[in-house]
Image: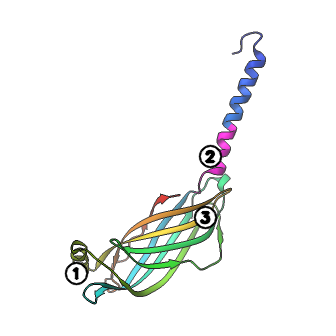
Amino acid sequence: MCPKGKIMLCIILYLLLIGAVAVTLVKILLFNPPNLKVTVTNASLAQFNLRNNNDTLFYNIALTITTRNLNHPANKDVLYSRIEAIAKYRTESFAKWTLSSPPFKQHRKSTTILQYPAIQGQQPVRFSKSELSQFNRESVIGVYSIEVVVLMQIKGNTKSYNCEWICTLKIRMGSIQTPFEATQCFRTKY
């Protein structure tokens, strides 16, 4: 405890300690980035093939992504102002979705479903020999390794964040009747 004559010093030290703990708690609760869980719950390919001497990728892909707000009660809501998803095969980006709805708020402990419509198109690609060989192997099996990068501009209690999640997917062609296995994405950037 406090020695005689030093009570005032002890009181000041205790108050400083309590103040430091309070400041730390406020920083943790108010200034930490939002805690989100991003999952691709459905993905489908109706077309995914190479043409024109293997330098043009033709695709038709659809995605469903869910976000779950796992925040602590002090960090209740998350405001989403921009959401994009970019599909990549190996090193080549081939499809991009931008959520066109106005900014929306997601409440704590709630889940939001982002349904991206099918996008079809063609994209010039330059695959190395090993990438082309991998593409041909996956074409025979009918299951493709596709990476989806999810980019979000969000706001927590006090600050805006540009976040990035990587989703490594195995997507079957539409004619194969095995259901898609939901895949959790991993945050790579805040």
| Horizontal side of residue 185 vs 161, given as left or right | left
Q: Quarter-wise, where is residue 147 in the image?
A: bottom left
Three-letter code for the amino acid on which mark 2 is drawn: Ile
Task: Determine the CA span between mark 1 and mark 3.
Answer: 41 Å
The residue most toward the bottom is 52
Residue at 42%, 69% (x, y): give it: 182
Secondary structure of residue under mark 2: helix
Residue range (magenta): 22-34
Residue type, mark 3 in image: Ile
What's the CA distance linking mark 3 and mark 2? 18 Å
Q: Nearer the viewer, residue 119 or 180?
A: 119
Dot 1 alpha-carbon crowd within 10 angstroms: few under 14, some 14 to 19, many 20 or more: few
Q: Are marks 1 and 3 in contact (CB under 8 Å)?
A: no
Q: Which residue is mark 3?
A: 154
Q: What is the chief secondary structure element of the magenta stretch?
A: helix
As rendered, which of 97 and 70 lies closer to the eye?
A: 97
Q: Residue at x 24, y 77 (%)?
A: 132
Residue 140: assigned label: 1
Residue 26 is situated, as x and y percent measured from the top left of the image, at 68, 45
Tell me, for residue 28, which label it has, or none: 2
8 over 59 or under it: above or below: above
